[in-house]
Image (cartoon, rainbow, N blue to C red):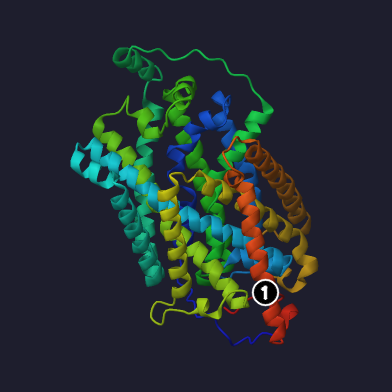
Amino acid sequence: MMDQHKTSGLSRQLTFTGLAATGICSMLGASIYVVPFMIQRNIPGIGPYVLQAFMMAAVPAILAAFAYAILASAMPRAGGSYVYASRGISPYLGFIASFSQWFGLSIAIGVVSYVIIPFLRDIALAMEWNQMAAMVSQGSVRVCLSLMILWFFVWINIRGAAWYERTLIPLMVMMFALGSVVIVTGLTTDPGAFAIDLMQNKQREIPQTVAHFDPWIFLSAASVLFSSFIGFDSIAQAGGEAKNPGRNLPLAIAMAVVVVGTFYMIFTFAVYRVVPWQFVASEAAHTDVTAPGLMSRILSPGWTVCIIAGAAVALTNDLPAMLLSVSRLMFAWAGDGIFPKSVTRIHPTFNTPQVAILISGTMASIGILGSHFAGDFFLGIDILVTSMLVNFLVMCLAVATLPTHNPALASQVKVVRNRNVQWLISVAGVLVLSAFLIIHIVKDFSADVPAWYYHSTAVWLIVMLIGSLIYFREVRRLRAKGEDLKSLFSNLPPE
């Protein structure tokens, strides 16, 4: 049996507010300013059904959130999703599912860091700081600024929970305040104002397109919009540092999903209320469209700058939360011996997994360089969506198998303790998430791409293969050392 006096070295300092902010900031990035509008190009024909597709996309996210809340209440440890699957189903499935999640999130951190800079450029242009805008548009400057922003948040993560919360919570408040400019404008402006402005300034009329509901198009759009709900699982990864984790982890997960889901719906409704979907679809067909670009026709330059700044802040506050998430996954693997033990090294002053955080920052830096040299980052986002669909699917399965696979841990569940309700959540989650995964894979392989490695599913399978090789090599090493694997993967890691 595991030595019950052994500790992880982490310190439970994250408050409920810090946990909720972690989930909210991981979920609510700048995609809300882009995805609900660019989807008119990515999924032609979705037309006026974007808001309904958002609601459909929330269904698998809510089911996965219930699964996470149930498992988090019983297993409040760092690297949540890995711990839940390794103790609830199998260590192999837990590792490779979380390994692909780690890979996708690490690349996404680099992508986010890289994409922040164009928003800063747009703010400079709106303020008529043309020299500054030209400077930050230079490739080398953009890469350097991206790396500086990334490593600032690496430093914040190493400094511990107090610094983390002091940084993240104000950013979250600022993000909602600036985002509310779009909502208030959309809900209070005359719906005809946009059409009048378009005619007066551009001599153009709104296209009179008629849309017909198509179930396949609708579900394809929902699978794309599902990506907007990725991120609440970062709360679970911080389980080893949460205060009162049995209560705060499930509550923070619920809070993040409800707050972000509500904000998505109101924000999207507000924009489409004043900007007809026909115009968004016609513009998206030949150029990139964003909420600031669409709303600028009915806003003053000053308020337009606020919207762009809101998008920049929304991107920025992704970084500390996602860095926390990926570093804690690595920490959990290393604690079980599936990764080098050096990754479990804790900072002597701040009680944070400094080696795991530094490695995560390095991996994200590769994501920045990859985005720069490849000139495109959507492949990385598609890989992340595949990884998270699989990961959420595994969490729902773990809810079903935990009582038979690990009765001792199942008895510690404090949320939704009724077994019949757990089964309902598990089965519904597996069915809905499987459907979304199939739609996502079919859409991926149906895409016309220049080479096989532009299919995100193919790249994801390669990542899974690499994860499998790492797992089996390390398990052989643990067996050779005489490690009791059954006991290791039946008990929770040290607290």
Numbered label tally: 1
Q: List x then y, in percent, for residue 31.
A: 46, 42
Q: Is residue 309 visible?
A: yes
Disc 1 crowd, CA 10 A, few/some/many (<14, 14-19, 20+): few
Residue highlighted by disc 1: 473
Name which quarter of the figure residue 90 lies in: bottom right
Q: Secondary structure at mark 1?
A: helix
Q: Residue furthest front?
A: 451
Q: Residue furthest right?
A: 404
Name which quarter of the figure residue 183 lies in: top left
Q: Amino acid at mark 1?
A: Arg
Name the image quarter holding the C terminus: bottom right
Q: Is residue 253 above or below residue 474?
A: above
Q: Is residue 272 left or right of residue 436?
A: left
Q: Residue at x 38, y 69 (%)?
A: 162
Q: Residue at x 39, y 53 (%)?
A: 113
Q: Is residue 353 visible?
A: no
Q: List x then y, in percent, for residue 458.
A: 64, 49
Q: List x then y, in percent, for residue 28.
A: 46, 47
Q: List x then y, in percent, for residue 297.
A: 32, 24
Q: Is residue 127 above or below residue 189?
A: below
Name the image quarter holding the N terminus: bottom right
Q: Is residue 36 left or right of residue 193?
A: right
Q: Residue at x 73, y 47 (%)?
A: 428
Name which quarter of the figure residue 321 lies in: bottom left
